[in-house]
Amino acid sequence: MSPSLFDSLPMPLQSIGTLPLFVVRLDVKPIVVVGATPGAFRRVGIVTSGRFEGERLAGTVLDGGSDWQTVRGDGSTTLDVRLVLRTHDGTVFTMAYGGIRHGPQDVIQRLEKGEEVDPGSYYFRMTPTFEAPAGRYEWLNRVVAVGTGHRFKEGPAYSVFEVL
């Protein structure tokens, strides 16, 4: 029997590593429900503040970001988020991400009521990209990142990882 395509790959192509980038916690106003639209059920979260911390960068999330959510027919929610962040040394950069959240209906209902649920009881992932000016943080422009999230009462928190 011949080896599978996966087994025939060089070792660097058989796994993927990550490095913690930062944890970000967002404060959001109550969700604005637009409702049923021709495409889906639309909600918008307005981000008022937040903070992020990691070994290589830390700072605050500026007021004015937004999270355009699409609640799909299968019960999952997709995210389209745009944020502006400022590092502790004053550098401003952007973070945009798409994501998806889904899980058992009872867990999602409890989550949306603001109840505490086990983060492991549902799926909440995101894929951020960054735009940073030339200088100390321009390396962010060349990073592929992934994150895993949880919805707290005040807003979401994400652990963001650089893909190596």
Image (cartoon, grey):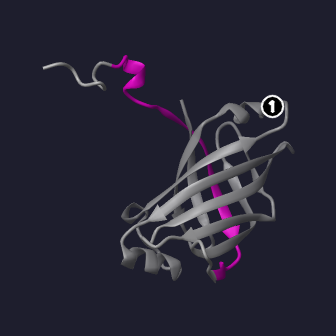
Residue 86 image position (x, y, % from top left): 81, 49
User: Which residues, given as a range, are shown in magenta?
Assistant: 9-34
Q: Secondary structure at mark 1?
A: loop
Q: Quadrant of residue 27?
A: bottom right
Q: Is residue 87 left or right of residue 20?
A: right
Foreground: 141 or 58? 141
The residue pinned by badge 1 equals 136
Foreground: 13 or 58? 13
Q: Residue furthest left?
A: 1
Residue 76 image position (x, y, % from top left): 46, 68
Foreground: 119 or 5? 5
Foreground: 119 or 129? 129
Q: Is residue 110 left or right of residue 55?
A: left
Residue 120 image position (x, y, % from top left): 39, 61
Residue 41 image position (x, y, % from top left): 57, 77
Task: Report the residue at 61% width, 68% height from top.
Answer: 69
Decide: few, some or many residues near mark 1? Use Cα within 10 Å; few <14, some 14-19, many ≥20.
Answer: few
Task: Give the answer, above or below, for where 40 lies relative to 15.
Answer: below
Check if residue 23 falls in the magenta segment: yes
